[in-house]
Image: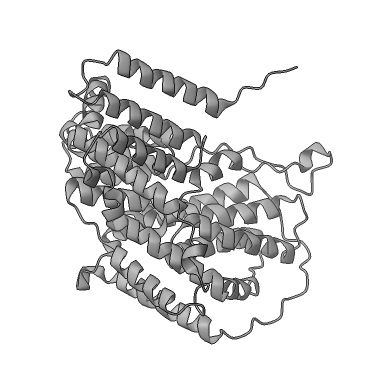
């Protein structure tokens, strides 16, 4: 009988053994009294990284262990619940619930399907653009993916792509990655951004506005990466439009509840975009929009909205922010990084080299801890990184957004569906989705 290695269990076994070694033989560089804290943090990061148990359960394990062993004050351990980032995610979940409950998202999709472009490359570009626009409208990447993937499949059907055609794969991938890649340039659109914002405020006292963040990142992370995504998909999955199915009937006009949902959403977007003028943070705009929806149950949200609310992302966020706050409070993260710092060729004045080191380090950390773990661990190291690079803290930590949004996504180019003859060639190579999507599920 052939034995198959269970990688998550193997990794966690190594992590637990390492945590035990730290407890019984602590390294000399650890701050005094932080041995148990280090072991708990290491096991928590291992659970987040391997997904051996649900991420929300990992957060609860961390909270319980932190309180039982008193590794930090309660206001530090549970600081994630007091963060504005927590309320951005809460508001985003309610907004997404209303968009799905009222059918507004499907109404928008029906109108998009009726306007399919006539060229294959334009179709892929249009799908990516729609995904990027949805990132502005609907916080929470997984909620957008759940909404957009069935729409993308319908678009592929209407465009005449067969079951295993390159075009169908490219359209679905364009919807998934289009709404995820560009969302890193939009502050409330995914969990890592919100973790970064919350950690910046709690650790460094820096409040970053919606438009400020958008101006920093949207030209590259939003526009340029979306253009590159279109080029990669068209190259990796070449195809051409087939015979279209019948033109869908005109979508019905928006209903009363859909119009109200759209009005509140547009008002929230306007408030987010003008935060430099009124000074109200994105979290409280999201919370205000959520309250409008909740006060109009069951029209705009289900009759029991909190029973339908997925609290998993909220617990994940609170746990990650709490872990980052504990590492910053105890000084463990800074002490560990100072051991590594002499091995890294940081040098003030070497901008390109410093950028590459911070960016590649964040990308590697994202592989080990999942994307939300990068700002949770990296932001508390801001002062040390600023000293090593000679840059302001804000500049160093802004690079983290570019690092944790970088995918390690191998692509093997497929031949055109017109040239495939063997049964083997019909197998869809989905750009390592089994690797990418589970790690992005909480975004």
Q: Is residue 389 above or below residue 142?
A: above
Quarter of the image with the N terminus is: top right
List x then y, in percent, for residue 412: 63, 37
**Res. 224 visible in picture:** no
Q: Is residue 256 above or below residue 327?
A: below
Left or right, 104 with respect to 140, comes to right
**Colouring scheme, one of rainbow, by chain, secondary structure, one colour:** one colour
Q: Please state which of residues 45 and 68 is positioned toward the viewer in this rendering.
A: 68
Residue beneath the point at 37% across and 34% down:
360
- Quadrant in which residue 34 is drawn: top left
* Farthest front residue in view: 68
Q: Please state which of residues 93 and 340 is positioned toward the viewer in this rendering.
A: 93
Q: Is residue 257 above or below residue 90?
A: below
Residue beneath the point at 30% across and 59% down:
215
Residue beneath the point at 56% across and 26% down:
7
**Res. 20 visible in picture:** yes
List x then y, in percent, for residue 178: 52, 56
Left or right, 303 with respect to 386, comes to right
- Quadrant in which residue 32 is drawn: top left
Q: Please state which of residues 265 and 53 is positioned toward the viewer in this rendering.
A: 53
């Amino acid at each position: 009988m052939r034995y198959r290695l269970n990688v998550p269990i193997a990794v966690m076994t190594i992590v637990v053994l390492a945590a035990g070694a730290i407890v019984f033989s602590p390294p000399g560089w650890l701050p005094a009294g932080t041995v148990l804290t280090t072991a708990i943090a290491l096991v928590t990061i291992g659970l987040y990284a391997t997904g051996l148990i649900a991420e929300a359960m990992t957060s609860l394990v961390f909270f319980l262990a932190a309180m039982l062993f008193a590794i930090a004050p309660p206001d530090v351990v549970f600081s994630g619940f007091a963060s504005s980032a927590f309320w951005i995610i809460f508001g985003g979940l309610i907004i997404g619930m209303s968009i799905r409950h009222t059918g507004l998202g499907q109404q928008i999709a029906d109108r998009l399907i009726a306007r399919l472009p006539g060229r294959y490359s334009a179709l892929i570009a249009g799908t990516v653009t729609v995904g990027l626009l949805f990132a502005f409208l609907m916080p929470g990447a997984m909620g957008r993916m759940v909404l957009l993937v069935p729409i993308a499949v319908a678009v592929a059907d209407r465009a005449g792509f067969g079951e295993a055609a390159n075009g169908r794969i490219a359209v679905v991938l364009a919807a998934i990655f289009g709404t995820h890649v560009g969302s890193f340039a939009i502050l409330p659109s995914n969990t890592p951004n919100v973790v970064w914002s919350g950690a910046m405020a709690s650790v460094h006292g820096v409040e970053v506005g919606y438009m400020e963040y958008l101006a920093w990142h949207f030209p590259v992370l939003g526009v340029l990466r979306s253009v590159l995504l279109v080029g990669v998909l068209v190259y990796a999955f070449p195809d051409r439009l087939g015979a279209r199915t019948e033109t869908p009937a005109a979508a019905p006009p928006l209903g009363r509840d859909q119009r109200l949902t759209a009005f509140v959403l547009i008002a929230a977007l306007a408030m987010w975009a003008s935060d430099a003028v009124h000074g109200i943070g994105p979290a409280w705009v999201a919370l205000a929009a959520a309250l409008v929806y909740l006060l109009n149950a069951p029209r705009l949200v289900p009759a029991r909205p909190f029973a339908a609310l997925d609290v998993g992302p909220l617990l994940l966020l609170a746990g990650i922010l709490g872990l980052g706050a504990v590492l910053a409070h105890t000084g463990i993260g800074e002490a560990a990084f100072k051991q590594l710092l002499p091995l890294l060729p940081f040098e003030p004045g070497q901008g390109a080299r410093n950028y590459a080191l911070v960016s590649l380090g964040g990308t590697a950390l994202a592989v080990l801890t999942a994307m939300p773990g990068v700002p949770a661990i990296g932001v508390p190291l801001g002062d040390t990184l600023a000293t090593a690079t000679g840059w302001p803290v804000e500049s160093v930590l802004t690079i983290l957004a570019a690092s944790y949004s970088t995918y390690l996504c191998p692509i093997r180019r497929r031949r055109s569906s017109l040239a495939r003859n063997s049964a083997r060639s019909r197998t869809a190579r989905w750009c390592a989705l089994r690797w990418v999507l589970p790690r992005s599920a909480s975004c």
